[in-house]
């Protein structure tokens, strides 16, 4: 028997789905795929009455008896309660959990079971939801139907969409239905969308004729015009006709209000049905419409408090407004619910909410109690506002940032005291920003009046600055933070230091970082931050940007050590925020090892929302370290999770890493890789492109995530490297001049481009340009003291050498300095240049040795464009370079996802353990392994340990 869990609404549309053949076929294919182990999801978008719920009902009927059906419906009055929708959807399935990872299980219980255990990262809840659905599907397919998704709480939406995008090869189908004005469409990139438009005249006539065969032609034409292609309007308008009106002997009355939309005409029909009911039944319907749980016992208990009893539901059932099935009460259609709630007077709605608040308290649900009390309150009420504030902190412990914002916002509306109101608005704005609701956060911040509390003022400044930064106004953000630091530092030096640190990061992104850093130093010079290490770190960053790398380097090193020593004193998000600034000094190996530890901790704690930033850092570090295959797999995973968690700004940065890797592999960026190339973006399984092999990195970033264009500076670097690798030195020089000349937005890209600029300038006989670029790199290398920077600096000297003897000495010294420096790509480039110099010096044997070593290194990375350049030089030196042996690079055949999975499998982890680490279902892990085995020439995971999967 199909098992169903429903929320308080059952949006019942017309059973006849005339004109919806395409949608029916698509949903049939989705359900068939789930039965065959090809999980998937779809979003239905349309106006009220367009047939969304009828399609969901058809899905439910199609799988009856053969699948586990989980169904819920969003309710507007409960949209601010964290995980309210997930609670209704999954509460009946939690007792079947057998093998979820412990942290995921705790997160899911915290979200769904209303335990005292915090839910944690909402995307971890999504991963746990995915795991639970996959586990349930081991017995039979699972079908999840979500109606009125526009009214779901944000936490439930995020969790369900995260799971929906990663269904992979599971036996799970998910269908979301939402109103055409819903933000769910915007929040669901990567999922297919079916738009339910109006029926054509012929389709409407067929539906009407099937429902009312004796309808007079003139009346049919009138109804078709009034319904405007809305299926429910057709059915309900026709159903409301008298027999005389149907045969045309009695004209339609004037109540049709022809100017109203079709959905409002249907609302009027439901209004009339409700007005005809006994008063106790109307009251009970108001209570049911204000409730989201659909729990008959709770609705009846609350109804008794307003003078109704269980038997009063009978007339509503007879009028086909609601249905009661077991313990669940469902409305026939959202418009019926809307009529029941909005058709009642204010005092009736307030009474219903007070009754539900009392019932919720009896059930121990204090969050719902607070919201129902707020809904019942008109005007100011500090007692209810204080209870909402307490509920906000309860929601925070459950990971519901959007719910925290909503609770504080409603509490502020109930607050008469202006200072208290501003504090609550500031808290609401901060929570909205944390939840990713940027527009709401800005609106709330604008409503905040004067705030005397320094911590609140600082928090508000941080929110406003983050919003400015998000809109590309880093300079404005910097000034906001500097002003706030000036105001609060005397009261709280530590808070002021944090604001200064944030302003330093904004200066980094300002149009003129040098001027911004100097201005920040001048404006904050008189402030006393005490002996605060965060202040010293901020000062180091500002000094470096302002042109004092010597003083800045010492402060940054000290700050980096402090961050590592005290990392366990702060949460993961703050650890990631503070970590890695010694990348400015070229300390890539050290920072990489620390980032690996952060990555491991993110996976262990299920910090899915934080993980993409760590993966971005790791991808860049692995690119800098010449570990191209690892950089690729890391960037693809980071891009996938960034898209799945709605962090577009990180997605564009990760796409930048991929486009550089593609350029190193010889693939030119496409025209639509620029910032104006696409408007949409999406997610998907990140395993559809080879992990090594020409052009894979670029395609992964573009094909799987269309519209995720790389940030311009990384795109320019990719184009420059491609030109350099292909010997197009004039074009390369132009691009590197953009990256290194004048104000820049990314110091490390600029620094790394200086040696490239030297090479391109030398090859185009621009010695002066080459000399200036080499001098700047020499200064930076001297400050950092890293071995690899010293080796590259020596290579630049070799390129600029005035005579052959000098050039050879510098090349030999550069290669010696490269020994053990951890930068294989830079070492291979030095050997390539040395080999080219040796060939031109007619020392062919020595040239062949250097070039062969360089070629082997480029092939291992891989860096196909540079390998081709080495082969060309080898042929010019009289050698015939061997083509790579067929099948030599087995790992290069794997997709990024397959490579990640087989590497973990080779360590002995089970599919479930691998799924927990990669936030995939175990079934999807098994699918990737089964695809990887034949590519690697093995038949089982036992053989993976003997392979070189590096």
Image (spheres, rainbow, N blue to C red):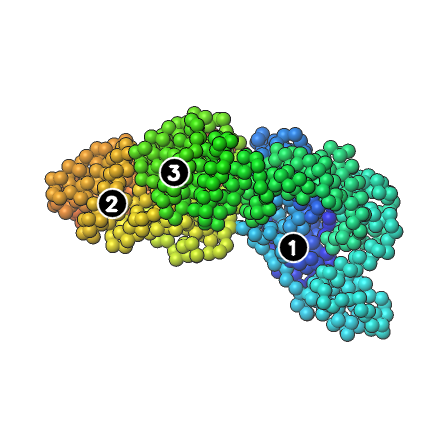
Q: Nearer the viewer, residue 912 or 556?
A: 556
Q: Position of residue 905 (x, y in %)?
A: 47, 34
Q: CA distance from mark 2 to mark 1?
A: 57 Å
Please, which residue is most extreme toward the front here? 526
Which quadrant: the C terminus?
top left
Q: Nearer the viewer, residue 689 or 571?
A: 571
For residue 27, say whether it is visible.
no
Q: How many marks?
A: 3
Judge depth for marks 2 and 3 and give the one in front: 3
Q: Quadrant of residue 364?
A: top right
Which quadrant: the N terminus?
top right
Q: Height in image: 752 above or below 591?
A: below
What residue is shown at x 81% (from left), y 63% (from top)?
Answer: 240
For marks 1 and 3, the one nearer the N-term is 1
Judge depth for marks 2 and 1 and give the one in front: 2
Q: CA distance from mark 1 to mark 3?
A: 51 Å
| Residue under label 3 | 521
Seen in the image, is 937 located left or right of residue 751?
Answer: right
| Residue under label 2 | 773
What residue is shown at x 22% (from left), y 49% (from top)?
Answer: 769
Q: CA distance from mark 2 to mark 3?
A: 27 Å
For marks 2 and 1, the one nearer the N-term is 1
| Residue under label 1 | 179
What residue is shown at x 69% (from left), y 35% (from top)?
Answer: 386
Q: Height in image: 401 above or below 872?
A: above
What residue is shown at x 61% (from left), y 58% (from top)?
Answer: 195
Q: Nearer the viewer, residue 137 or 624?
A: 624
């Amino acid at each position: 028997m199909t098992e169903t869990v429903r929320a308080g609404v059952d949006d019942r549309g017309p059973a006849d789905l005339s004109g919806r053949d395409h949608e029916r076929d698509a949903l049939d294919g989705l359900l068939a795929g789930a039965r065959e182990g090809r999980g998937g999801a779809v979003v239905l978008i349309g106006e009220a009455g367009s047939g969304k719920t009828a399609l969901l009902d058809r899905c439910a009927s199609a799988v009856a008896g053969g699948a586990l059906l989980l169904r819920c419906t969003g309710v507007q009055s409960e949209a601010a309660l964290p995980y309210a929708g997930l609670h209704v959807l999954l509460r009946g399935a939690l007792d079947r959990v057998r093998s979820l990872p412990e942290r995921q299980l705790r997160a899911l219980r915290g979200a769904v079971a209303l335990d005292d255990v915090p839910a944690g990262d909402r995307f971890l809840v999504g991963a746990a939801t995915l795991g639970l659905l996959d586990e349930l599907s081991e017995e039979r397919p699972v079908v999840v139907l979500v109606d009125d998704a526009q009214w779901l709480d944000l936490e439930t939406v995020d969790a369900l969409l995260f799971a929906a995008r990663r269904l992979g090869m599971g036996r799970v189908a998910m269908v979301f239905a939402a109103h055409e004005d819903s933000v769910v469409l915007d929040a669901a990139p990567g999922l297919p969308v079916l738009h339910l438009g109006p029926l054509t005249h012929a389709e409407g006539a067929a539906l009407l004729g099937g429902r009312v065969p004796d309808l007079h032609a003139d009346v049919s034409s009138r109804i078709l015009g009034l319904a405007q292609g809305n299926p429910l309007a057709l059915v309900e308008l026709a159903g409301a006709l008298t027999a005389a009106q149907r045969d045309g002997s009695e004209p339609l009355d004037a109540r049709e209000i022809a100017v109203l939309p079709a959905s409002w005409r249907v609302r009027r029909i439901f209004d009339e049905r409700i007005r005809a009911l006994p008063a106790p039944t109307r009251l009970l319907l108001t209570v049911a419409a204000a409730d989201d749980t659909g729990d008959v016992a709770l609705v009846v208990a609350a109804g008794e408090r307003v003078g109704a009893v269980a038997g009063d539901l009978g007339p509503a059932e007879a009028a086909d407004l609601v249905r009661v099935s077991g313990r669940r009460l469902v409305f026939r259609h959202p418009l019926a619910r809307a009529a029941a709630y909005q058709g009642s007077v204010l005092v009736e709605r307030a009474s219903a909410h007070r009754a539900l608040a009392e019932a919720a308290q009896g059930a121990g649900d204090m969050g719902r109690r607070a919201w129902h009390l707020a809904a019942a309150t008109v005007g100011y009420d500090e007692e209810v506002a204080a209870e909402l504030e307490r509920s906000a902190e309860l929601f925070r412990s459950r990971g519901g940032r959007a719910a925290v914002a909503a609770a504080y916002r409603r509490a502020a509306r109930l607050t008469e005291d202006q200072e208290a109101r501003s504090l609550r608005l500031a808290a609401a704005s901060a929570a909205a920003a944390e939840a990713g609701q940027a527009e709401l956060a800005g609106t709330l911040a604008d409503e905040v009046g004067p705030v005397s509390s320094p911590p609140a003022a600082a928090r508000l400044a941080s929110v406003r600055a983050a919003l400015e930064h998000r809109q590309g106004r880093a300079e404005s953000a910097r000034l906001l933070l500097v002003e706030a630091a000036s105001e609060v530092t005397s009261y709280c030096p530590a808070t002021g230091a944090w604001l200064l640190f944030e302003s330093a990061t904004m200066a980094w992104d300002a149009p003129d970082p040098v001027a911004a850093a100097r201005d920040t130093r001048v404006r904050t010079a008189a402030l006393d931050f005490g002996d605060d290490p965060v202040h010293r770190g901020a000062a180091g960053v500002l000094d470096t940007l302002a042109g004092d790398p010597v003083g800045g380097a010492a402060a940054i090193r000290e700050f980096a050590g402090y961050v590592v020593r005290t990392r366990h004193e702060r949460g993961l998000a703050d650890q990631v925020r503070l970590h890695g600034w010694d990348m400015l000094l070229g300390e890539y190996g050290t920072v990489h090892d620390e980032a690996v530890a952060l990555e491991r901790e993110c996976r262990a704690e299920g910090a899915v929302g934080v993980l993409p930033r760590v993966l971005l850092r790791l991808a860049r570090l692995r690119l800098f370290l010449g570990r191209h295959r690892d950089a690729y797999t890391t960037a693809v995973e980071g891009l996938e999770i960034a898209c799945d968690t709605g962090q577009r700004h990180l997605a564009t940065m990760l796409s930048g890493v991929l486009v550089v890797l593609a350029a190193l592999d010889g693939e030119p960026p496409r025209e639509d890789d620029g910032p104006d190339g696409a408007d949409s973006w999406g997610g998907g399984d990140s395993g559809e492109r080879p992990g090594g092999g020409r052009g894979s990195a670029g395609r992964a970033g573009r094909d799987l995530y269309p519209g995720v264009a790389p940030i311009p500076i990384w795109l320019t670097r990719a184009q420059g490297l491609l030109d350099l690798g292909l010997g197009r030195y004039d074009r390369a020089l132009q691009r590197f001049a953009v990256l290194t000349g004048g104000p820049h937005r990314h110091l490390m890209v600029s620094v790394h481009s200086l040696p490239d600029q030297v090479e391109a300038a030398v090859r185009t006989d621009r010695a002066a340009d080459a000399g200036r670029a080499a001098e700047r790199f020499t200064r930076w290398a001297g400050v950092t003291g890293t071995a690899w920077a010293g080796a590259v600096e020596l290579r630049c000297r070799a390129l600029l050498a005035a005579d052959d003897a000098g050039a050879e000495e510098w090349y030999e010294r550069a290669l010696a300095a490269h020994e053990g420096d951890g930068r294989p790509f830079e070492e291979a480039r030095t050997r390539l240049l040395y080999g080219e110099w040796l060939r031109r010096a007619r020392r062919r044997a020595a040239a062949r040795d250097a070039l062969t070593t360089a070629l082997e290194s480029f092939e291992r990375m891989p860096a196909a464009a540079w390998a081709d350049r080495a082969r060309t030089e080898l042929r010019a030196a009289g050698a015939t370079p061997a083509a790579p042996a067929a099948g030599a690079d087995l790992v290069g055949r794997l997709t990024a996802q397959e490579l990640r999975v087989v590497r973990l499998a080779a360590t002995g982890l089970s599919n479930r353990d691998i799924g927990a680490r990669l936030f995939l279902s175990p079934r999807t892990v098994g699918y990737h392994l089964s695809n990887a085995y034949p590519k690697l020439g093995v038949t089982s995971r036992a053989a993976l340990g003997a392979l070189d999967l590096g």
